[in-house]
Image (cartoon, grey):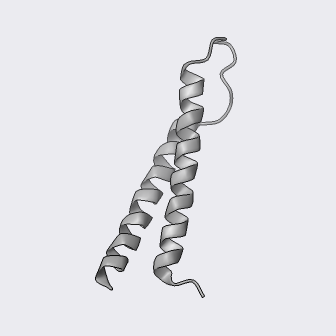
Amino acid sequence: MITMTELLAITGLSAAVIAAIAWTGDRRRIRRKNLDKVGFMPWTPIFFAALLVAVSLLGLAARAWFAN
């Protein structure tokens, strides 16, 4: 059975992976060679939202882990 601390940590790590993917996508969009191929994904807002969720959940998981 998964405890609440483990659930927070797993979800936080998943959000961190999504943030890393979005950061990579944003870097590729900025450094593209063909300026007419912009794309449709809003990488920057996805990155910031995922990073906010990751930091919050991992912080709560660490707080619960240190409390035990």
Image quadrant holding the N terminus, namely bottom right
User: Residue, x 63% and y 12% (percent of image)?
Assistant: 33
Residue 27: image location, x then y, percent = 53, 28
User: Residue, x 56% and y 18% (percent of image)?
Assistant: 31
User: Residue, x 49% and y 72% (percent of image)?
Assistant: 8
Q: Is 18 placed above or below 56 here? A: above
Determine whether, in the image, residue 11 is placed left or right of residue 62. Answer: right
* Quadrant of the rendered image containing residue 25: top right
User: Residue, x 68% and y 13% (percent of image)?
Assistant: 36
Residue 52: image location, x then y, percent = 43, 54
Which one is in front, 4 or 38? 4
Image quadrant holding the C terminus, namely bottom left
Determine whether, in the image, residue 39 is placed left or right of residue 29. Answer: right
Q: Is 18 placed above or below 59 here? A: above
Q: Is 21 placed above or below 28 here? A: below
Which one is in front, 37 or 17? 17
Q: Is 58 placed above or below 30 here? A: below
Give the number of callouts.
0
* Quadrant of the rendered image containing residue 65: bottom left
Residue 17: image location, x then y, percent = 56, 51
Residue 35: image location, x then y, percent = 63, 12
